[in-house]
Amino acid sequence: MTATVTAKGQVTIPKPVRDLLGIAPGSKVDFRRAADGSVVLVLADEKRPTSRFARLRGHAGKGLSTEAIMALTRGEA
């Protein structure tokens, strides 16, 4: 994707990039220099959009003790 820099140094971020990063009007972005010298655009807001993988994460509760897991494995439960 290509964008043109205006006389004021402004650039319109392409919509696919805005959608990918969750950038909305009023969002703040950071420009970071990567180890290879390239510049990376990242969303600077504290409230980052939930990734599609983060939505799948969860916690099943306290869980089972080691003894209970071993009993289930052995067929004792």
Image: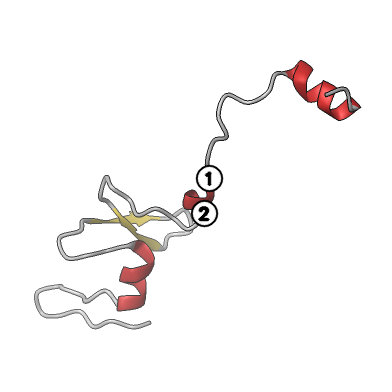
Residue at x 30% of width, y 78% of height: 14
Q: CA distance from mark 2 to mark 1?
A: 7 Å
In which image quadrant can residue 65 be found?
top right
Residue 23: x and y in percent read: 27, 63
Q: Measured along the vertical axis of the image, is residue 12 above or below residue 65?
A: below
Residue 38: x and y in percent read: 41, 63
Front in this rendered view, residue 71 or 35: 71
Q: How would you rate the neighbour count of disc 1 (Cα within 10 Å): few for under 14, some for 14-19, many for 20 or more?
A: few
Front in this rendered view, residue 34 or 43: 43
Extreme residue toward the front, this view: 77
In which image quadrant can residue 32 be found?
bottom left
Q: Which residue is mark 1?
A: 57
Residue 63: x and y in percent read: 63, 26
Q: Measured along the vertical axis of the image, is residue 46 above or below residue 67?
A: below
In which image quadrant can residue 34 be found?
bottom left
Decide: marks 2, 1 in contact (CB < 8 A)?
Answer: yes
Front in this rendered view, residue 73 or 23: 73
Extreme residue toward the right, this view: 74
Q: How would you rate the neighbour count of disc 2 (Cα within 10 Å): few for under 14, some for 14-19, many for 20 or more?
A: few
Indicate the amino acid at tag 2: Phe
Residue at x 31% of width, y 69% of height: 18
Q: Which residue is mark 2?
A: 53
Circle 2 — which element? loop
Circle 1 — which element? loop
Residue 12: x and y in percent read: 22, 76
Residue at x 21% of width, y 56% of height: 28
